[in-house]
Amino acid sequence: MIVGVADKTVRPLTLAARILVFAAVVLAMAQVAAVLGAIALLRLLDVYAFPGRVWASYAVIGGIFTLAGWFLSTRRRPKK
């Protein structure tokens, strides 16, 4: 009887905790990858597209992030 209770209570809680931990790890890794990707794009633009003009690379990256933010802002829905 105790095994049946443990199967119905402990296992779902363990599964939920495991899902939360893995989701947190994946989210942290995605954030690191996004930052490293932005840095790599900035370096590529600085070296190959606009050599010696870092401000142009920053302007392009800023424009990309601004357009992405604008697009996401237009896709949101008002609260009901």
Image (cartoon, helix red, strand yellow):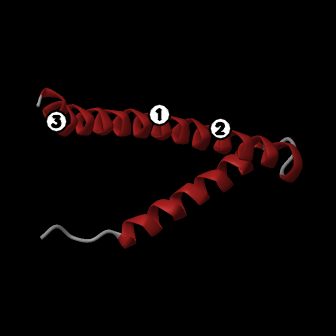
| Residue under pointer 1 | 25
Measure the alpha-carbon separation of dots 2 and 3. Answer: 48 Å
Q: Residue at x 60, y 59 (%)?
A: 64
| Residue under pointer 2 | 36
Q: Is residue 55 left or right of residue 50?
A: left
Image quadrant containing the N terminus: top left
Q: Residue at x 67, y 47 (%)?
A: 58
| Residue under pointer 3 | 4
- N-terminal of the pair, mark 3 or mark 1, is 3
Image location of residue 68, percent across then percent down: 52, 62
Measure the alpha-carbon separation of dots 1 and 2. Answer: 17 Å
Image location of residue 65, percent across then percent down: 55, 55
Q: Residue at x 32, y 38 (%)?
A: 15
Identity of the amino acid at label 2? Leu
Identity of the amino acid at label 3? Gly
Dot 1 crowding, Cα within 10 Å, few <14, some 14–19, many 20+? few
Image location of residue 47, percent across then percent down: 86, 43
Q: Residue at x 84, y 50 (%)?
A: 50
- Mark 3 against mark 1, which lies toward the viewer? 3
Dot 2 crowding, Cα within 10 Å, few <14, some 14–19, many 20+? few
Identity of the amino acid at label 1? Val
For residue 70, which numbered disc appears in the image?
none
Measure the alpha-carbon separation of dots 3 and 1. Answer: 32 Å
